[in-house]
Amino acid sequence: MQAKVKGCRACPLHETRSNTVFGVGDPGAELLIVGEAPGADEDRRGEPFVGRAGQLLNTMLAAIGLDRGRVFIANTIKCRPPGNRDPHIEESMQCRPYLLRQIELIQPRLILATGLVAAQNLLERDDSLARMRGRRHHFGPERIPLIISYHPAYLLRLPDQKGKAWQDLQQVAAELGHARR
Ligand code: URA
């Protein structure tokens, strides 16, 4: 599947990418984190969340006793939109089968969607983050619990929102604790 993504030319983003960004982590992870799309650092390295937002994500994970190697991190789309614009709907639609297949293969116990784009993509709903966050959601026919939180890049811009993100992280920790019981 990784090779398939690497050779993907389904949308025009293949023309401007340096690397595809498949995802990284433990393929048997209990927690799947879904971000928006690769940025410049990710495009260069071929790995999600390696820039400043990624550093914050690592710190957030460490706060609940997790590290990158124990979770799986992916994005809604696998190629960088030029200039870090939001993904276009056609790009998200073309790329969606890859994310769905990743979820099918990983079979996570919990999905954490970071930010509006990931939340809207996973819930297939055109709603605001404020309305989607703080409620219990489920993904797909297997009804995988889905938590919606802020994107780390947003928290870098508005650090006073970190308290709310911390509440979400505690919910993640609690949910994973329950899952192991
Ligand atoms: N932001 C995202 O949403 N994903 C990345 O991989 C990096 C930054």
Image: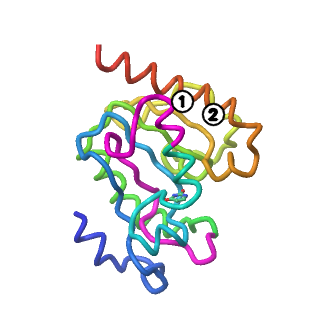
Position of 58 relative to 87 (above/below): above
Locate residue 106, reporting x and y percent: 26, 43
For the residue pair 143 and 118, the one nearer the viewer reads as 118
Locate residue 116, reporting x and y percent: 62, 48
Position of 29 relative to 35 (above/below): above
Q: In which quarter of the image is the C terminus?
A: top left
Which residue appears farthest toward the top when viewing the image? 181
**Residue count near mark 2 (Cα–Cα under 10 Å), binned few <14, some 14–19, many ≥20:** many
Left or right, 73 with respect to 169, comes to left
Q: What number is the disc on residue 165?
A: 2
Cβ at disc 2 under 8 Å from ligand 1: no
Number of numbered labels in the structure image? 2
For the residue pair 97 and 156, the one nearer the viewer reads as 156
- Residue at horizontal 67 percent and vertical 41 percent from the top: 129
Amino acid residing under circle 2: Ala
- Residue at horizontal 68 percent and vertical 36 percent from the top: 162
Figure quadrant of residue 111: top left
Magenta span: 59-84
61 within the magenta span: yes
Figure quadrant of residue 69: top left
Figure quadrant of residue 53: bottom right
> At numbered mark 1, what does the secondary structure look like: helix, strand or loop?
helix
Image marks 1 and 2: residues in contact by CB distance under 8 Å: yes
Q: Label 1 to label 2, Cα distance in Å?
A: 6 Å
Q: Name the residue under label 1.
A: 169
Position of 6 relative to 136 (above/below): below
153 within the magenta span: no
